[in-house]
Amino acid sequence: MPVQVSLEFTPNPDTLKYVVSETLLERGALEFRTVDEADDAPLAQTLFAVPGVKAVMIGRDFVTITVVDQDVMMEANTAVIDALKRHLEAGEPVITGVPPTNEHGAVDDDVSRKVVEILDAQIRPAVAMDGGDIVFDRFDGSVVYLQLKGSCSGCPSSMATLKHGIEQRLRMLVPEVREVQAVAI
């Protein structure tokens, strides 16, 4: 069965998003910053073989790739579309083994549970539309720490989104939250 792949631009000028016509993951997203991290992800390995690809994120029905620089973006784009179609149409696995069941950090208190619920219901779906993902790392004192993935990682506008969008929303819905910070992965 032919796989449809459509390109979408993201707010990150070094990252492209590819929406595919089939489900790649049942939930969440997996990010690979090097080919060595992709041992259990044959699709990511296929995409890392494309010259210029330096990071891959696989979401429910999309893939984002980050390139080493914008000079290789057009060539990488064509090769990524071809590689995605070949891999998926051949029935090759997206991942092997068991996907992670909990992509969030420790959720062991009521505030953390509220934050994760809001992230999963309201924020992550919106961020996924731009080819990214945001994962709860921890709640410490009055600060929520989040991991930025995919097109969000290294995006020039990610800090504005984090502070003016996500932080304001969480502060409004969870009074214990006073600040949101990004953490390095």
Image (tube, rainbow, N blue to C red):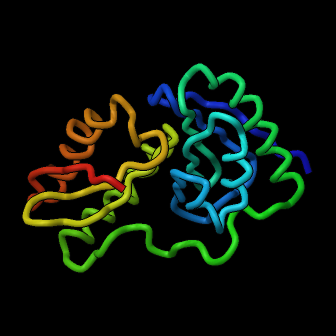
Residue name at image x 13 percent, y 50 percent: 179
Residue 31 spot, x, y in % from top left: 52, 55
Residue 68 spot, x, y in % from top left: 54, 32
Residue name at image x 58 percent, y 48 percent: 56
Judge whether 15 appears above or below 55 on screen: above
Residue 155 spot, x, y in % from top left: 39, 33
Judge whether 158 appears above or below 62 on screen: above
Residue 158 placement, left or right of 69: left
Q: Would you identify the image quadrant in which residue 92 lies?
A: bottom right
How many numbered callouts?
A: 0
- Along the viewing direction, whichever of 21 and 56 lies nearer the viewer: 56
Residue name at image x 74 percent, y 51 percent: 46
- The quadrant of the rendering that contains the C terminus is bottom left
- Along the viewing direction, whichever of 122 and 92 lies nearer the viewer: 92
Residue 57 spot, x, y in % from top left: 56, 50
Q: Would you identify the image quadrant in which residue 156 lies?
A: top left
- Along the viewing direction, whichever of 118 and 37 lies nearer the viewer: 37
Residue 179 placement, left or right of 127: left
Residue 103 placement, left or right of 142: right
Residue name at image x 79 percent, y 43 percent: 83
Residue 181 placement, left or right of 134: left
